[in-house]
Image (cartoon, grey):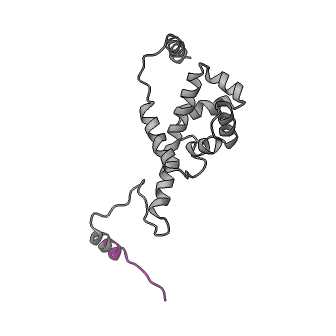
Amino acid sequence: MKIEFSKEWCMRMARMEGDATIAAGTYALDPVFTQEQRYKELVIEDSNVVFGRFIKLMRRRRGITTEKLAEDADVDLAELVEIEDDARFKPEQRTVYQLANYFDVPMRNLMQIAGLTVPKNSRLFDEAIRFAARSEPVAQLTPEEQAALEAFVVILSEEK
């Protein structure tokens, strides 16, 4: 048996659906996944902001540049820049391991904060989000930051 749908039938069905829309970014309801599963997915997505800020503040607390941290922790400089500046960047496990050793923090927790493992401790995630909200920089640029910014603007402004 072959079922055929005419154009008129399709148009009539579409009008009957009214204002139903399909849009990018909405989640399909799948009975296989529970609310807990969705919560874990959101935690992993949001954790990169926390991880990047944590690494940046730990680096700044030690008074070292990104280049120096990359050298001392034996991690790729480009990846370290991505970690600190791109909230969607997923770091390599080796990098997180090296940074955990360098900053002397538990690797298991840092892996969770980096979004590489599913969080087992909801308190850790809640505190991580609180940390990210409180660690937004509001201070004036230091003289070194101002000089670096001005030098970069000069190069950026050059026309070829």
Q: Magenta stretch: residue 10 in it?
A: yes
Percent x, y of residue 110: 60, 41
Q: Relative to residue 72, is residue 123 depicted above or below? A: below
Q: Relative to residue 137, is residue 6 depicted above or below? A: below
Q: Residue furthest bottom?
A: 1
Q: Relative to residue 1, is residue 114 depicted above or below? A: above
- Residue closest to the eye, 64 or 45: 64
User: From which residue to which does the magenta span run?
Assistant: 1-11
Q: Residue at x 63, y 45 (%)?
A: 108
Percent x, y of residue 3: 44, 83
Q: Magenta stretch: residue 105 in it?
A: no
Q: Residue at x 42, y 35 (%)?
A: 133
Q: Residue at x 60, y 30 (%)?
A: 81
Q: Residue at x 56, y 31 (%)?
A: 84
- Residue closest to the eye, 114 or 76: 114
- Residue closest to the eye, 127 or 88: 127
Rendering quarter of residue 27: bottom left
Percent x, y of residue 15: 28, 69
Q: Relative to residue 75, is residue 90 depicted above or below? A: below
- Residue closest to the eye, 139 or 20: 139
